[in-house]
Image: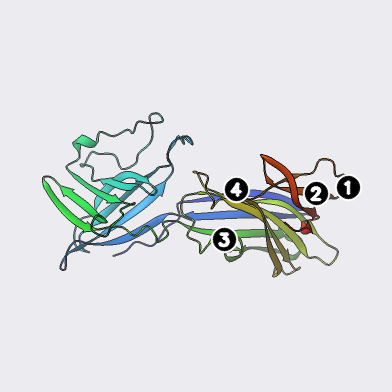
Amino acid sequence: MLNKIKLLFILISSSLVVQGQEIEVIHHISSDQTYPIKINENESLIIYLNFYSPGITNYKALPYFFVNGWYEMDENSEKKNLVGVYRPSNSLVLFAPMDNGPTYLDCIDDTTLNMDTTTYLERFYFPLNARSEKTNKGVWINKNQKTFINNIDFDKKNVCHRVFLKGGDLSRDVNRSIDITDFVISPFGNNDIYLEDYNIKLHSSHKDSLGNSHILLLITNEYVVPSSSSSGGYYYLMLDKYQVIRKNKYLETYNQGKYISYKDDNFSHATKQRFLVIADWSDSQIIGSFIIDKGKIETEKEW
């Protein structure tokens, strides 16, 4: 009955070449989720949703994402297509189009959708900021009939990240991907980062004389609406010559409202880079520093 979660898109965030070995960070994001919705003791329905970003992002307004999918009453019933808009911490509104209705939405401009919602006789509304259990109910409107149904639990993740490190060394005919998700997601929670601006890219890499690869990743979890949850830093991984992870370390160098880092342009060295940590841009007081050298990161002054 339930479709397998499928891939929304695959992004190769960045790549670099280290002594003939190309290294890539591959970011898989799956946003497809299936939700069981209870209507009453004897009836329930299944809603399948796919979340995706609008074509135009207005960072001055509250974030929103488009949704498409379907719903069905049981295994033998016909699936009905759904389109709608998801506004985090506000609401999810879904519409069931007619046979000739759209199954995918986009923007005309910053404020207008390409759909006339007055033409839909069937719709779902799920409040996401209800303050009491009494008001925390979804509403299913089918023609003139209104039915209260269980709400969707958005505390459960609606997006799943998988991050892979791919390295190819043709001299040993090794070409495989290494799942580093648990390493690079763990500083930010339990892989429940749903539709924020989570970014990961290769900062630098170095292969030593023993064949070990030292890889430094730059990661930020910058919410669309800045909050105390926005943070970032560098993740160090050491892989041996067989591409097995032997060392790992995360160093947070940015935390919204607490500290931020920048490169020290007055520091001069053939291979090393020095970064200063300050309390905030409005406060130039230096509270710490760290050094990056040949794919490694080292704390110079704790902050």
Residue named by callout 1: 269
Mark 4 or mark 2, which has the lower sequence index?
4
User: Mark 1 belongs to which amino acid?
Assistant: His
| 243 lies above or below 107 | below
Mark 4 vs mark 3, foreground winner is: 4
Give the image quarter of residue 173.
bottom right
Q: Is residue 19 visible?
A: no
How far across and how far down the image is residue 162, in percent? 53, 60
Give the image quarter of residue 187.
bottom right
Mark 4 vs mark 2, foreground winner is: 4
Q: Give the distance between the C-alpha atoms of the residues marked 3 and 2, in whole angstroms.
A: 26 Å
Q: Which mark is residue 274?
A: 2
Helix, strand or loop status at disc 3? helix
Residue named by callout 3: 185
User: Mark 4 belongs to which amino acid?
Assistant: Gly
Residue named by callout 4: 257
Q: Residue at 20%, 40% (x, y): give it.
A: 120
Mark 1 or mark 2, which has the lower sequence index?
1
